[in-house]
Amino acid sequence: MSSLFSTPNMFSFSTLMLLLLQLFTINLRSADAQVGVCYGTLGNNLPPANEVVSLYQSNGITRMRIFDPNHDILNALRDSKIELILGVPNVDLQSLAASADNAIQWVQNNVLSYFPFVKIKYVAVGNEVNPAGGSSEFAPYVLRAIQNIYEAIKAQGLQDQIKVTTAIDTTILGKSYPPSQGSFRDDVRSYIDPIIGYLVFANAPLLVNVYPYFSYSNNPNDISLPYALFTSPSVVVSDGQYGYQNLFDAILDSVHAAIDSTGIGSVEVVVSESGWPSDGGFAATYDNANTYLDNLVRRAKTGSPRKPSKPTEIYLFAMFDENQKNPDIEKHFGLFSPSKEKKYPFGF
């Protein structure tokens, strides 16, 4: 058999190396593109939407999450090529669940009026609704609102391009340690199981807000700071065939295990929020936030121990410090100051 490198009509060795380098660069950029940033607007000193979109672009941030269909932001995103998670506020869920026509009108006003010039990737119907928590009044409407929005998008033939889902927090987990024993609380199963069933049917991911900061700050005696900041030099938690060097992966895999434990089917998980505050509370320092966020950006290039084959899509929280949020600690999650200056030296 002729050698690839000795056949005159084939690529030269130097050409082949160049092609391999190009493929590596493409793959690296693809991995980098797994990182997005949440754009909250609860501040009275924030720059206008067009300047914010330019700030995303100039910093190489290719994905954005917004929490409501703000038309100033949607208009600013036209032709930007930034992929978007478009949020449906919890206060709109009852109306969208009550009427298919309401959902059709919502989709017309907030999706079809912008797509494809705005690259809407997911519609997040509700955020952190917990039937056993402080947002329980919204829980009866989430699934029906999801279904009505999905049907309105499907009627336009866009169900494979725009996925309809919801965002949960990890307080609905009943057990998260060890990660392989992750499960949903018994008092939320009647809520979350039908949603997982819909996600399997629609081939849509579940959005999950993952905050090692709160796990650590609520339990610093049992959780070490290096484990929370991705700086532990070795495995901290051994769980059968899996080893965990950081709390983020442990929380994420407990969600994977909880989904698997329902027996309903496989659902991809997108981390729709994760961050670390730079002020306002225990261990909320600039150095800790810088370390966590920098390592989280690097972490997005890989999978978790339980799901190692695919990089994790992660949205950092948040673009700006927002001075109208409460309690005080919520004001200090920004990657940028309202003056558009970077708080941290790392890049995206």
Image (tube, grey):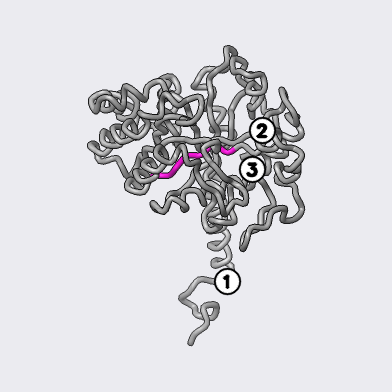
**The residue tagged with tag 1: helix, strand or loop?**
helix
- Give whichever of 339, 278 is nearer the camera: 278
Label at residue 296: 3
How far apart, in angstroms, are the residues tagged by discs 1 and 2?
A: 47 Å
Q: Amino acid at mark 1?
A: Phe
- Asked if the residues shown at circle 1 and circle 2 are in contact, with their CB atoms under 8 angstroms apart, the answer is no
In the rendered image, the vertical position of residue 126 relative to residue 180, given as above or below: above
2 vs 3, front mark = 2
Q: Residue at x 66, y 19 (%)?
A: 328
What whole-number distance in Å separates the C-alpha atoms at marks 1 and 3?
37 Å
Residue type at tag 2: Trp
Mark 1 / mark 3, whichever is N-terminal: 1
> Would residue 345 be seen by someone viewing this image from the given angle?
no
Q: Position of residue 181 (x, y in %)?
A: 56, 52
Q: Quadrant of the C terminus?
A: top right
Chain part drawn in magenta = 204-210
Q: Position of residue 335 (x, y in %)?
A: 64, 29
Q: Earlier in the sequence, mark 2 or mark 3?
A: 2
> Could you tell me which secondary element the residue under label 2 belongs to?
loop
